[in-house]
Image (cartoon, rainbow, N blue to C red):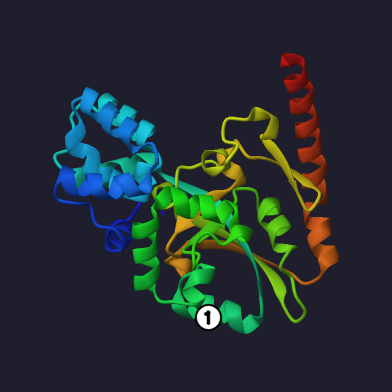
């Protein structure tokens, strides 16, 4: 699946349609993004305000600077906001990213049978409630709430995370491995447009504080300013059977630790290198 299929585009539009007018888009975008006045001013200044409705798609709105630059570079502008969405989605392409879940065989079979990976909120309420929650709380707040999930800023979580390094996904899963369950590491081929363009830093309370760029989880160091560290996804991950490229099942805590050991060592080296360079700049 080299390109983003029509079915994948249609699925995203079923979750959130592109408004017919700039005015309608403005109402939703003002909820989605705290910096919307800046976004609106930039598109107005470039005489591209007619494409503001495209930003209502979270995979575009969270990449608004990239989308604006893409529009300016296009030799011929898209004819409509929806046409722009389709073409921009193709320009982003796809990525292989990983999700690791602590599951029983029966729970994994549910993923296969439903052909999707649900967020935790979907286990509590239906799709309609989750979709409405994203619209009412806004895209940025949902991602911010996921980063600080322990604070329970929203009643249900309509989001999921993917990680480009399988070891990162497994590190997260070590928190949840329980008796009777195994860690299912799934390598997924997903369109980038389905993932938010936010980095961890973009939804952090310390977004511009480089001193807090790196963080530790389960003794492994991670760079919060890299896209590969964590990709946010809203609603659900559909088309599981078509997208799942690899599956590895880890049964014990020791298997999990062995899997991430070399990665953990390499991450520590990267962190120490960054720390030394950062210290020189202070």
The furthest residue to the right: 254
Q: Residue at x 32, y 50 (%)?
A: 57
* Residue 191 position (above or below residue 179): above
Q: Nearer the viewer, residue 172 or 30?
A: 30
* Residue 7 position (above or below residue 80): below
Q: Residue at x 34, y 72 (%)?
A: 128
Residue 111, given in percent of the width and then of the height, sits at 52, 75
| Horizontal arrangement in the rendering, residue 19 relative to residue 270 (left or right) | left
Quadrant where the image shows the C terminus: top right
Q: Nearer the viewer, residue 181 or 39?
A: 39
Q: Nearer the viewer, residue 85 or 279?
A: 279
Residue 187, given in percent of the width and then of the height, sits at 58, 58
Q: Nearer the viewer, residue 24 or 168?
A: 24
Residue 67, given in percent of the width and then of the height, sits at 33, 35
The furthest residue to the top: 281
Task: Say which element carries label 1.
Answer: helix
Which residue does the numbered mark 1 point to in the structure image? 110
Residue 147, given in percent of the width and then of the height, sits at 58, 51
Quadrant where the image shows the N terminus: bottom left
Numbered disc total: 1
Q: Residues within 10 Å of mark 1 (few under 14, many from 20)?
A: few
**Residue 162 visible in image:** no
The furthest residue to the bottom: 106
| Horizontal arrangement in the rendering, residue 192 relative to residue 260 (left or right) | left
Q: Residue at x 19, y 33 (%)?
A: 49
* Residue 63 position (above or below residue 27): above
**Residue 207 visible in image:** yes
Q: Residue at x 42, y 63 (%)?
A: 235
């Amino acid at each position: 699946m080299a390109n983003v299929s029509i079915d994948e585009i249609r699925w995203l539009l079923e979750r959130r349609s592109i408004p017919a007018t700039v005015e309608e888009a403005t109402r939703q975008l003002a909820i989605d993004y705290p910096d919307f006045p800046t976004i609106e001013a930039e598109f107005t200044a470039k005489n591209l305000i007619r494409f503001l409705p495209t930003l209502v798609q979270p995979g575009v709105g969270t990449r608004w600077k990239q989308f604006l630059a893409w529009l300016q570079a296009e030799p011929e502008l898209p004819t409509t906001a929806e046409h722009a969405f389709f073409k921009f989605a193709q320009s982003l392409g796809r990525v292989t990213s990983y999700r690791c879940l602590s599951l029983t065989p029966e729970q994994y079979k549910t993923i296969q049978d439903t052909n999707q990976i649900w967020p935790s909120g979907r286990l509590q309420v239906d799709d309609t409630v989750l979709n409405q929650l994203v619209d009412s709380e806004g895209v940025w707040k949902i991602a911010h709430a996921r980063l600080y999930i322990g604070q329970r800023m929203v009643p249900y979580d309509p989001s999921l995370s993917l990680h480009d390094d399988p070891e990162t996904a497994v590190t997260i899963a070590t928190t949840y491995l329980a008796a009777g369950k195994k860690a299912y590491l799934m390598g997924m081929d997903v369109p980038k447009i389905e993932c938010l363009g936010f980095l961890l830093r973009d939804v952090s309370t310390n977004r511009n504080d480089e001193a807090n760029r790196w963080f530790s989880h389960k003794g492994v160091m991670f760079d919060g300013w890299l896209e590969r560290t964590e990709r946010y996804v809203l609603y659900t991950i559909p088309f599981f059977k078509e997208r799942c490229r690899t599956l590895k099942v880890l049964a014990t805590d020791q298997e999990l630790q062995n899997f991430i050991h070399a990665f953990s060592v390499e991450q520590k080296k990267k962190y120490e290198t960054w720390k030394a360079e950062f210290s020189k700049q202070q």
